[in-house]
Image (spheres, helix red, strand yellow):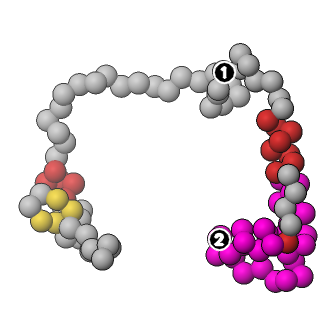
Amino acid sequence: MSIDKETARRVAHLARIEVAEAVLAPLAQELSNILDFMEQLNEVDIDGVEPMTSVTPMALPMRKDEITDGGYPERVLANAPESREGFFAVPKVVE
């Protein structure tokens, strides 16, 4: 897939990145190279290959799923700058 200057300009606009006019042509070439590499990766036969999260086999330690007393909210909230009705009180961040 080939990316032209106009497409590179649009991608930069969508990403909210200011790109100088002189840099658009090299950027378009780099984006084209990335897409070409992605097409090469799509050609690799991965049938029968299981997904992995690490190159070495690992098992995460599991804890028993036990019912507890729920912790100690009084001690936890003692560290909070402000709390109300048993919860952390934080400033409003959404209008």
Q: Position of residue 43 (x, y in %)?
A: 84, 32
Q: Position of residue 68 (x, y in %)?
A: 18, 31
**Viewer-proximal residue, 87 or 23?**
23
Within 10 Å of the Cα at label 2, are there few (<14), some (14-19), or many (20+) other Cα atoms?
A: few
Name which quarter of the figure residue 39 lies in. Answer: top right
Q: Is residue 70 highlighted in magenta? A: no
Name which quarter of the figure residue 19 lies in. Answer: bottom right
Q: Helix, strand, or loop for circle 2?
A: helix
Magenta range: 6-34
**Viewer-proximal residue, 50 or 54?**
50
Name which quarter of the figure residue 22 lies in. Answer: bottom right
Residue beneath the point at 16% across and 46% down = 72
Name the residue carrying label 1.
50
Inspect the image, locate mark 1, and give the three-letter code of the amino acid beneath it: Glu
Q: Which mark is residue 22?
A: none
Residue beneath the point at 12% across and 65% down = 84
Residue beneath the point at 46% across and 25% down = 61
Within 10 Å of the Cα at label 1, are there few (<14), some (14-19), or many (20+) other Cα atoms?
A: few
Q: Position of residue 48 (x, y in %)?
A: 71, 16
Q: Which mark is residue 14?
A: 2
